[in-house]
Amino acid sequence: MSTRDGIILETEDLTKEFAGFVAVSGVELRVARGTIHALIGPNGAGKTTCFNLLTKFLQPTRGRIVFKGQDITDTTPADVARLGLVRSFQISAVFPHLSVIENVRIALQRRRGGSFDFWRSARVLDTFNDRARELLREVALEGYASTIAAELPYGRKRALEIATTLALDPDMLLLDEPTAGMGHEDIDRIAALIKAAAASRTVLMVEHNLSVVANISDRITVLTRGRILAEGDYATVSANPEVREAYMGVGHD
């Protein structure tokens, strides 16, 4: 399998079985570079298992995963992240008692190779501060730079998690239910952040909020019982009778 021009991520016969239960079965996923691609489906459809396979937290029973033309099927999670495929909320605001800008700065230092650079000069550390402030502006958190992360409102915490992920400069961002548990105002804000992030990156997201999916997704893959049921834009998949039966009438995933 060779990744075609314009396709940043591709899977072939991606399958995962757990003690005889097939969670993901023969998934052929193709994500175009520079798009927002949504993965939707009812509870138990295999979406999270797919994400875990793509980011190498699970090893497939069979199948292949190609990212930027490179076979990453047997690659470690850390190496996949270094290649530019990063799952948000996996590397997130894990330091609740540090400030917002400190969290982003630590993510920037991680990108240098895992060192926290505590011994480096103030001049070098100031370069982290400058980039950290840029990232905070990108996610509308510039006014919260000195706020302790644990004190942020829920929606702002999710924005911080996106900022710490963007600090790793990913080519492709995987978002696992980025608007879960949010009110309308926060949902709109996070959706706008995702759209802005996708201006220079590719986004693959699992999302249960169909309004968000309809508004920002370029392409949608519908999973049910571990298999791809349908693909296309929102108008196409929402009009598909099988999709409507399997998913559209189902509550939150």
Image (spheres, rainbow, N blue to C red):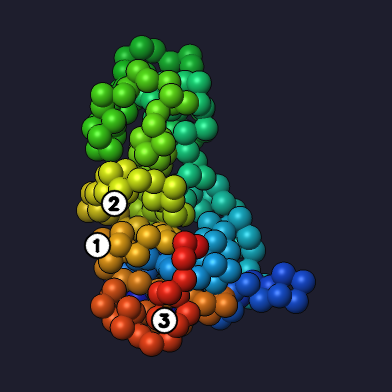
User: Which residue does the numbered mark 2 point to in the structure image?
Assistant: 191
User: Which residue does the numbered mark 1 point to in the structure image?
Assistant: 215
Q: Which mark is residue 243?
A: 3
The location of residue 119, given as percent across then percent down, is 48, 14
| Mark 3 vs 1: CB contact within 8 A | no
In the image, 142 versus 41, the foreground residue is 41
Numbered disc 3: secondary structure: helix
- Cα distance in 3D space between marks 1 and 2: 9 Å
The location of residue 19, given as percent across then percent down, is 77, 71
Residue that protrudes farthest toward the right in the picture: 19
| Mark 1 vs 2: CB contact within 8 A | yes
Numbered disc 2: secondary structure: helix
State which tag comes first along the sequence, 3 or 1: 1
Q: What residue type is disc 2 on?
A: Ala
Would you call the spot at circle 3 few (<14 residues within 10 Å), some (14-19), or many (20 or more)? many
Numbered disc 1: secondary structure: helix
Q: Residue at x 64, y 63 (%)?
A: 59
Q: Residue at x 29, y 74 (%)?
A: 234
Left or right: residue 177 compared with residue 7: right
The location of residue 86, given as percent across then percent down, is 45, 50
